[in-house]
Amino acid sequence: MIPVCRLEDLPKGESVRVETTPPVAVFHTDDGDLYAIDDTCTHQDASLSEGWLEGSLVECPLHAASFDLRTGMPTCLPARRPVRTHRVTVDDGLIHVHLAAEEGTAA
Amino acid sequence: MRTVTIVGASLSGLYTARELRAQGYDGRLVIVGDEPHHPYDRPPLSKDFLTGRADEARLALTDAEETAELDAEWLLGVRVRALDARARTVLLDDGRTVSTDGLVIATGASARRLPGDSLAGVHTLRTLDDALALREELARGPRRVVVIGGGFIGAETASSCSSLGHAVTVVEAAPLPLVPQLGADMAAVCAALHRRGGVDLVTGTGVAGLRGTATVTGVDLTDGRTLPADTVIVGIGAVPNTAWLVGSPLAVRDGVLCDDGCVTALPQVVAVGDVASVGGHRAEHWTSATLQPRIAVTNLLAGRTVETADALPYFWSDQYGARIQFAGRCRDDDTVRITEGGLSDGAPAEGGFLARYERDGRTTAVLAVDRPRPFMRARRELARDAGEKRMPSVTP
């Protein structure tokens, strides 16, 4: 379980990159949901935390591949492989990411 | 249409095949490619592939499952020789012919060559085989590398070579590289990145010739100097692959001439990617090659131009640990204003910057170094404004 930041420090529509190995991106959607996925686009080396968040989709800032934050699945080319998703919890106002590998659940 | 043939099995050819199937074409699909490889992505060749961070499998643009779904006949490792438009036939180099109702020209471009570049140690970097040969040579130990041409391929290759520990010099004939693409101000900023990588940039002098008998030993410059070299990489642009169309009714002038909808003078022939001169512009951008196929296929299947390609030009370059992104169309007389971040000693400062190109109070283009998020916002605004500006001239 990795602490990310306080909930109020990640406003809706914003994202943050967690420097794990591999790095993870945490998103706070406009609807108020929190999602975490692997930060690196599966197409080429680009950080999805820098991407364009719309609903529960994030668009890669380099080549406009899009991923569904809920499932990690790519919704359009050029990405064809999913990113891993990670569980997010808020405990006492602090956002935590539970890495998929730690929980033994391959995404 | 019962047969559609795509000549060219790279990025735009593959995207066209996908679009044909996605738009409901269920006839025979033939894909001809001069390289023996299935479609692969070229941008990493000068970057992660050259440095060994990415392997061949990472370059693949498609997989067995998708290939099966496309249900195409792949004729790989064979060049096209000619188009017989009247007979609606494509002639291949090995003597085979393909009769076809529709034709997609996606033959791309080839690296421009230099006289005498058949010496060992002289490379171009365009194809997977080019990159494999260069990578293998660079693995033999520290070398003196001269990169001829300071454009994006030249700069990226120089950056990769330097990160591998080689001593690198870049030679650029113009006083400054990338001025046509970026304008003088930003070209100077990007040129300063070479310093960051410890690479010598020699500008304002051409190449008089290459030295060596069997293997290259140096590069003679027009100013009289000679740069000793073990490896020379020629990065002086690309020429569209149109030789096979000589004698066909298609007009060729720096690419295959198409209207704004990628349609040539023949309605059953469309062109996409690096080889296509669409509405008078030929772009060698990855993004164009992925966006044009949708328009081209729509028009091919309609038998006339019903949609036009008007995407905002976009390209990126990774060099010396910096990511450069550019969108829009800039001109020499645009004013350039840095609106976020800044410079340090003429080079991008830590954290990069965002610059806007402006003319008559409007933003014409945006450039960012290491500022992907603001760049993405600015690029979207630019695309939206361009769309609004164009709207009044659109006829239903």
Image (spheres, rainbow, N blue to C red):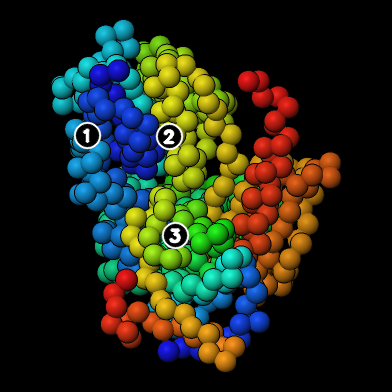
Q: Picture coordinates of residue B133 (x, y %)?
A: 27, 56
Q: Are marks 2 and 1 on the same chain?
A: yes
User: Callout 3: helix, strand or loop?
Assistant: strand
- The three-letter amino acid code for the residue at tag 1 is Ala
Instruction: Estimate the x, y position of residue B3 in percent, counting from the top left.
Output: 25, 21
Amino acid at the residue labelled 2: Pro
> Which residue lies at the image location 33% right of the left edge and 65% below the top edge?
B54
The part of the image, by quadrant, that contains residue B144 is bottom left
Between the C-alphas of marks 2 and 1, the distance is: 17 Å
Residue B75 lies left or right of residue B199; in this view the side is left
Marks 1/3: CA distance? 28 Å
| Chain letter for mark 1 | B
Dot in front, 3 or 2? 3
Q: Residue at x 68, y 54 (%)?
A: B378
User: Is A80 left, or right, of B182 in this rendering?
Assistant: left
In the picture provided, is B183 more to the left or to the right than B85? right
From where the camera sits, is residue B328 visible? yes
Residue at the image point whose x is 71% and y is 37% from the top: B388
* Number of residues whose C-alpha sits closer than 10 Å to that of mark 2, classed few (under 14), some (14–19) or many (20 or more): many
On the question of residue B115 being in view, the answer is no
In front: mark 1 or mark 3? 3
Quadrant for the C terminus of chain B in the image = top right
- Hey, which quadrant is residue B215 in on the image? bottom left
Q: Which residue is mark 1?
A: B72
Figure quadrant of residue B88? top left
- The residue labelled by disc 3 is A67
Secondary structure under tag 2 reads helix
Quadrant including the N terminus of chain B? top left
Q: Which residue is mark 2?
A: B293
* Spatial separation of the CA atoms under disc 3 and disc 2: 22 Å
Q: Are marks 3 and 2 on the same chain?
A: no
Task: Determine the residue positioned at 29% across, 74% down.
Answer: A106
